[in-house]
Every structure is written in C-alpha cells, then in structure tokens.
Amino acid sequence: MSVTRRDFIKKSATTVAVGLAVPPWLAKMVWADSVTSRALTPTGPAGNRSLVVIQLTGGNDGLNTVVPYADAAYHSARPGLAHADSSVLHLSNYVGLSPVMAGMKGLYDQGRLAIVQGVGYPNPNRSHFRSMEIWQTAEPEKMASEGWVGRYLDAIRTGRTSPLTGINIGNEASEAFTNAHAAVPSIQGLANFGVVFPRNPDGDARTAALKQVQLGDTNTPYGHFFQQTAQETYQSADQIAQGIKKYQSTVQYPKTAFGRSMQEVAMLVAANLGTRVYYISTGGFDTHAQQLRRHGQLWQDVSDTLAAFQADVEQMNAGDHVLTLAFSEFGRRVHENANGGTDHGTASEMFLLGKPVKGGLYGSYPSLTDLDHGDLKYSTDFRAVYATVLDRWLGADSEVVLGKRYEDLKFI
C-alpha cells in the first residue's frame, strides 16, 4: 500500500495512540510526498558541498563591526562608542574591522572572507521576532510558513530525503528549516549523542515502544512506515556516532559555547554524512547598554572561532567543500544612546567565509548622513546573498526557492 504524508497525518491520531516516541523530524521524512514538478537535483561539484549558516541573534551593530573609521559622521554620532582610527584593522581607506577581529582580518587578507555591506530589505522591521522571521523565511512582505533553507531542501530532494541533509545545532530548530517535507534533526551536544529517553517509567516505556515497532508486524496499517521510521532513528544516530570518530584535529577553538558548537560542526563535516546545510546561532548582540566591552567580547569569540573553524576544515581537506554564511536580523542605529549602547536599527553586513569565496568588499557602505528616521538605508537585498549562494554554491535554482530572481553578487 502506498502511504503518503497527508494520509498519515489525517489518520495518525488513532494509529499513534500507543504513545510511540518517534522524533518528529524523522517521522516527517519517511514516505514523504513529491514536492514540485520543478524539483532540483544538484549534480557535479555542487553535490558534495555544504553551507554553514550562522545566526548572530540580537541585532549586531554593523557600524562597530565593519567600521567606517574615515567618516567624520561616525565619530560625531558615537563619541563614546567609536573605535579610534589607529585601532581599526583597515580593509580600505574608508572601512576596517573592529580591533578584536584579528582572526577574520587574517582570513580577509588570505582572500577567504567576503563582506557584503549595507544589507537589508524594504520596509525594515525592528522587532527581533518579526525581523528574524523575515530573514529565516526570506519573505519580508508576508507571513510565511516555510523557511528558505527548508524550501531549498524540499526542492533538491528526489524521492525520500535523508534525515541528515540538514542539521540544526542547538536545542531549538530554526524557522529557516521549516518546510512541508524535508526533515531536519536538532542536535545539542555530540558527546553523548544517540536515541536516549529519560531513565524513568515514561522514558523506559518510550524506549520499549520504539524497539517494539522496529521489530513489529509490517502487515498492519502503516506498519512499514513505523518500522522504517524506527530503523532510521537508530541508524541515523549510529551514523553520526560512527562518523564523528573520524575527526582528528590539532586546531584550538575558543573555550566558549560558540567555539564548542562550531567544533561540533567541524566534527560533522569530518563525518561526511551528506549534510548540505548546517545551522547554528549565537546570541548576545542586543547591546542597548554598555556596548563597547560586550560587543568586543562577542566579536573576539566569533572572529577567533571562525578562524579556527576555517583552519580545521582545511586541515581535514574539506576547505573546498564548505562555505560559511553569517548574518544578524538587523543592525543598530547610527547614534549611540544615553546608556552607552545602541538601539534597534536596520542595515548591516553579511559575511561569507571559505576557500570558495572571492574575498573582498561587496556592495556600497550606507551613508551615515542620508538616513531614514535615524537609520541606515540598505543598498543590497539580503535575498540577493541567498540567491548567490543557492545558484553559485548549492547548485539550486534560486528562483524556485525564493520565488523570483535577485542580483548575482558574484562573491563565489
């Protein structure tokens, strides 16, 4: 009997009455429907490429990250926050990186870092929740139910999608992965990764149910569905556990939460699981008060971690196959506030990192005097960055994923 996802959802209320503890990301994957007649199948070099998406949560202050040190308006608007010209790590005769970003400056000098300036979208929203939703769904004009990465994973699948095509690092899945069909696990910590339920009566019952289904009768309605789901649960966990044993590295990461998480991404890269997109977030960028010290700490961590990650993937000879993208949901206002911080703003930068990038500055830096109610005017639509990554790196048709054609920024 052919079982579709829609059939299963309609009837699962009675079928799953036994309390089966099947991870929803895996149950979603098995026997999925076809997505679209325009489904894509990456071939050639794109078939073994991975994208690492880093979400800088909170709204990063782009002006103190990629610093317009030569602009008098910058120093005038930020008498307490502006970096001194002499301390900035110069990239051009106008902008430079924050003094703490030596790791990323080294990558820039090697041609491994592309910075897209003035990134935003029309009618910007200054709410953390709504703006992040816009970035994750690539839909500024409407409320969307699917994320841009999820639409990509749907578009490239043929038949049944591997549960490891996308991996979210952390205990909460990103809306960027939300979609109708493709399945994405969230992993928090690889040290003891596996199919483990709490050691209590409820957890023991769930473990027993999953094992029973794995050995159960496939002649019952949806029996094959459940059996294959159970098998895939254990097989996927085993695949990751065995794969990360391949990881050997002499690279030293910062001993921070973000450093540890990015090293786990490196371990998954070394495992060669066929993953196309990894997604990870790091927070703290909502710097309304006492920004100078905190922002420096954040970017010291991010910069040093990304330099370590790049060294790591190159040490394992995976540098040609991994591209990293970093973004934040919005920038900050031009003028500092009375609390030694900055409030929610609009345009900021995006960063592309890796051997495949054509390093340098892309787009134009926004004017610090021609403002929109005190905020920067964007010059590059963030969807153009996504489109360039989809077309040039992931081997997908960005128009299928994003709904229209955007500018090719040619940083790959």
Image: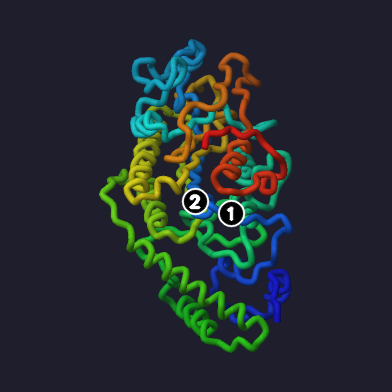
Snapshot quadrant of residue 100? top left
Q: Quadrant of the N terminus?
A: bottom right
Closer to the N terminus: mark 2 or mark 1?
1
Disc 2 vs disc 1: Cβ atoms closer than 8 Å?
A: yes
Is disc 1 surrounded by few (<14), some (14 to 19) or many (20+) residues within 10 Å?
some
The structure residue drawn at horizontal position 36% and vertical position 25%, both measured from the top left corner, is: 99
Residue highlighted by disc 1: 42
Q: Position of residue 252 (x, y in %)?
A: 28, 45
Left or right: residue 293 versus residue 397 is left
x and y, in percent, of residue 51 in the image: 50, 48
Q: Describe residue 125's horizontal placement relative to residue 201 as left or right.
A: right
Provide the secondary structure element on which disc 1 rests. loop
Q: Please state the horizontal and vertical placement of residue 131, each as a whole percent of the image.
A: 62, 39
Q: Which residue is mark 2?
A: 49
- Please tell me which residue is depicted at 56% across the width and 33% down the height of the picture: 410
The vertical placement of 84 against 21, above or below, is above
Q: Which residue is painted at 58% across and 30% down in the image?
A: 119
Q: Residue furthest left?
A: 250
Quarter assignment of residue 371:
top right
Q: Is residue 152 above or below residue 235?
A: above
